[in-house]
Image (tube, rainbow, N blue to C red):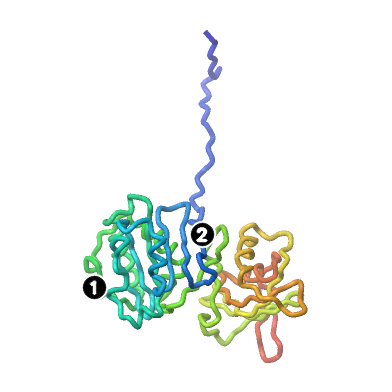
Amino acid sequence: MADLKGPTDDTVVFQQYPLLDRELPFVATIEFLDTSLCGLRRSQSMGGILAVVAAPFLQLDRLKAQLPSASSNICYLVHGSVVYVGQGNGDRKIGERVAAEVLNKAQVYVLYSFDPRFHKLAAGYVEARLVDRLHDIGVPLANLQRPLGGNLNLDPGFEQLVRQAEFLLGVAGFRPLEGLGSTAGRPSLSLPATRILGDVVPIEPDQMPTPPATLYRLRHKGLQATGFLSGGKVFYVQPGADYALTAQRGMTEYNILRRKGLEQFLEPVPGEEQHRRLRVGLRCATLPIASKLLTGEHIGKKAWQVVTPDGGAALPV
């Protein structure tokens, strides 16, 4: 029999395991099933059991063809000048309680799952919580009543589904949960890169918010762009911004992926080979992120100037 030798002293040896990264962000992907920002699209994540498929309401039949089966449980939102939230199964008559003039210009979002844990009770809970959340932040609702009168007992397990649902809806273009009373019928979508971090959002020109009095101008190696701050930190890049095609050394993997996601929104500039022009606007989490995306360089806000009648002054750091 082999001689099994253990430690020769009383030292306790602990196996070393890496610590859990509790700050790891929930990430998702978006798949454009059409070529349009607002066409048929699907958002999902490896870290959750839910998925969202979205489309203009007029393409509802195409959207339903993406669902698992007619008997699967769903929660859905119709978003036009008002928002309607409902739940049922795959053959539910979505939109039957919303006025026709709203439906004609609305987007529809359907939450679904292949996992049996997303049963009727779970779908009903997500519906109730979404209605409560939208009601509480002042979004106009077509729902005449709040499920359970707004007195739902919160369940920690189901709350994780609600958080997943809100994130995936945002990735698919549903914005009202991000601010007070937003009712835009046309969505703006997060970048279709491998990792969606929710900090860069392309926005169609006619959906850009009204800029404030103070604007900022990019002045860096011949590139030009204008933008503005919102809420003290979020930075909007206005449509038509110059975009450097080459990414320099020092760019992080995430920023390279974000830039790759922007390539579909680029238009050629006559006589220019080194840069293109963005046809859409961008909502960036910070001004430095906007700088890196447009220039392809690891730079911050020093490349921007305040637009003033006398030509601009350096933006303070």
Q: Residue at x 64, y 65 (%)?
A: 259
Looking at the image, is 314 positioned above or below residue 132? Answer: below
- From the image, which quarter does the C terminus lie in? bottom right
Q: Is residue 217 left or right of residue 72?
A: right
| Residue that carries the numbered disc 1 in the rendered image | 145
Q: Residue at x 36, y 50 (%)?
A: 115
| Residue that carries the numbered disc 2 in the rendered image | 29
Q: Nearer the viewer, residue 36 or 15?
A: 36
Q: Position of residue 220 (x, y in %)?
A: 73, 75
Q: Amino acid at mark 1?
A: Gln
Quadrant location of residue 269? bottom right
Looking at the image, is 174 positioned above or below residue 157? Answer: below
Instruction: Assign a secondary structure to mark 2.
Output: strand
Q: Nearer the viewer, residue 204 or 147?
A: 204
Q: Is residue 268 left or right of residue 142?
A: right
Q: Amino acid at mark 2?
A: Thr
Count the labels in the image: 2
Q: Nearer the viewer, residue 217 or 99?
A: 99
Residue neighbourhood size for the residue with mark 1, other residues' Cα within 10 Å, grouped as few (<14), some (14–19), many (≥20): few
